[in-house]
Amino acid sequence: MSRCCEILKRDGPARLGRLLLNRPLDTPGILSPEDWVSAGSVFQYPSLQEAREAAMGCQDEGKLFIQPYIPSALHAEIPLQPPLVEVGGPSGLVVHPFSDRKPEDADVYIVGNAGSLSRPRDLVEALAGLRERIPPDAALFAPALATPWNLALLVYLGVDLVDDVRVAMDGYYGKYHTRDGALPWKEFQEIPCRCRFCRRLQEIGTDESQEIERGEGQDAGREVPELLAGHNRQKLEEEVARVRELIRREGMREYLERQVRVTPDLTATLRVLDQEHVYLERRTPTVRRSTLYATTAESLQRVEVTRFAQRALERYQPPHSDVLLLLPCSARKPYSTSRSHRLFALAVGGYRRHLNELILTSPLALVPRELEEIYPASSYDVPVTGRWDLEERDWLLRCLDRYLANSPCGTIVAHLEGELRSAVEEHGIDATFTAGGTSEQGLASLASAVSEACQGASRLGDFRLRQYRALADYFFGRGAGDALLEGTVRLKGREVQDEDRRPLASITPNGTLALSLVGARRLEPLGRYLVTIGDFEPRGTILAPGVVDADAEIRPGDEVIVVGSRAFGVGRARMSGWEMVQSRRGVAVDLRHVKRESDRR
């Protein structure tokens, strides 16, 4: 557990934080030689005892102190871990990337032999594996590895700190770095950058023949490597700042899916990482303010996509309906606000009270009408071509098969057209297919098909109550909706109240469920999404050291119920439940309502 590293924001495995050294360092960040002192390899000393004594004498409080370490080959297990030296300031520990041994406590963990991690599977196994073995509030430092074109991927893998060793050395070897890769400087006819280093490089390139004639070519030749190293460092610094801003804006994954196209190895690494679903899911918030742009094949593997589909199939309980209406998605979200879905609603008229509506879309596959206002269903965008590739079809039809197997209904009306209709029809789903679309003929066929299907069908309950039930199940697990809405309840605006007119919950502008204390009491016996705190009365926020236990299912952005011997409250999680328990620093929960347990009624 770290004493000097605090994580402030998360966007998947990418984290924004701060490392408290002599100069506070924002992470992701570049660690310079001025920020640390190292005891070095134990092999430079006659014995471990002398290595320990030398290490005790080289400490500089306020700088990161790197403990004595044993260097080893990339795939070789180190025979032992040298005993740690007690330090008053931040401590760094070199760890072997493929060791199964749990490391000792430290503030920063340095990836041993990081520069040799060139294969995609090695990179994912090493960095994701280390991130799982070290405390969540400690920083991970990968030296001699970062470039402007791979930095985003390293940060998304869980790296917090890098250095500029690789880009500087590449400069001395004549390599010129950009976000699009590295090329020999001499291959450029026009330098694409306008930094001060590149302006000088342009001058040297332009005046090279004159300098040689004047006998100055040798001096210019010595200047070039320094200039290339300076440019490369600047590009890395710019990329670090760009990545930090992307994390703030919650756009890391979208940027990464574009950036990995620089080389096949980067694309392969992201695809290998996406196979580590548990690693990514444990670190991905449930709610984002930004739009999810699904523009690549990798978008289908995003945690937000697979998590939504899983919850829609496993937690959401469709209403007992005799008629299921399949509809296409719309460009505008939520769908109900779009022109096409307003026309669909007008076409079915009063029969809508008999219908269970399911929207078919890519990449989310299925969106029940009750869940259309929550992320990511409420804020995603895809390239619209009318074409469905094989992966999209397969994903949609697998989800639809599971939905129909778990939610049998009497009649299916499919108001679909184009390749979407072909995919469903060719799959053999027994449905009445309309003409689809929003033309006069299409809407007339929809009205006719629904009218016929709804003859003798039972009416469904109030849609808003169904929505509250669905949201409670989605965010707190199956059965939460029944517990929240037990007994007599009434609706007032976007709020649901009990029989005594006390608020139970409300739907927030981003579609999530905000519990009142009364509503939280109803869900508390389920034992889910609980954060247990110590013997104190919190105010405003709950810090990680105050958390005694937390549900492992909690993710950043989740609504949580706070319970303690002296307080009861509700709020939003700022970190995952497992992080709350293991962290020593950072805000665990932003409280919204809290009261003393002595006031419990």
Image (cartoon, rainbow, N blue to C red):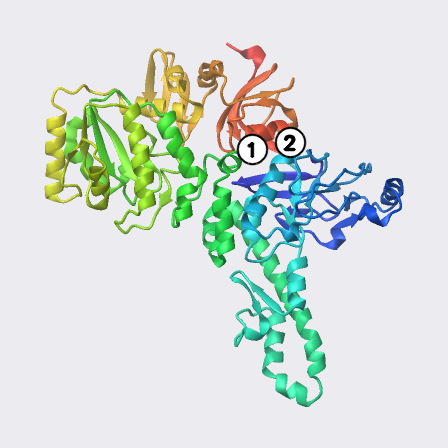
Q: Residue, x 10% and y 33% (percent of image)?
A: 448
Q: Residue, x 35% and y 46% (percent of image)?
A: 381
Residue 252 lies, in percent from the top left, at 50, 47
Q: In the image, is residue 64 above or below residue 326?
A: below
Name the disc covering residue 324, or none.
Answer: none
Q: Residue, x 58% and y 20% (percent of image)?
A: 532
Toward the top, the furthest residue is 601
The amino acid type of the residue labelled 1 equals Met
Please, what secondary structure does the residue beneath circle 1 have?
loop
Q: In the image, is residue 322 above or below residue 41?
A: above
N-terminal-most mark, 2 or 1: 1
Q: Nearer the viewer, residue 113 or 156?
A: 113
Alpha-carbon neighbours of circle 1 within 10 Å: few (<14), some, or many (≥20)?
Answer: many
Residue 224 lies, in percent from the top left, at 66, 73
Q: In the image, is residue 519 above or below residue 172?
A: above
Q: Look at the image and tell me in which quarter the N terminus lies.
A: top right
Q: Would residue 400 appear left or right of 524 to someone viewing this image?
A: left
Residue 303 lies, in percent from the top left, at 45, 38
Name the disc covering residue 575, or none.
Answer: 1
Q: Nearer the viewer, residue 53 or 122?
A: 122
Determine the image quadrant of residue 579: top right
**Can residue 471 be seen here?**
no
Alpha-carbon neighbours of circle 2 within 10 Å: few (<14), some, or many (≥20)?
Answer: many
Q: Nearer the viewer, residue 385 or 499?
A: 385
Toward the bottom, the furthest residue is 213
Q: Residue, x 16% and y 20% (percent of image)?
A: 457
Q: Are marks 2 and 1 in contact (CB under 8 Å)?
A: yes
How many angstroms separate mark 2 from mark 1 (CA)?
10 Å
Please, what secondary structure does the residue beneath circle 2 have?
loop
Q: Would residue 24 appear left or right of 510 to someone viewing this image?
A: right
The amino acid type of the residue labelled 2 equals Ser
Residue under pointer 2: 583
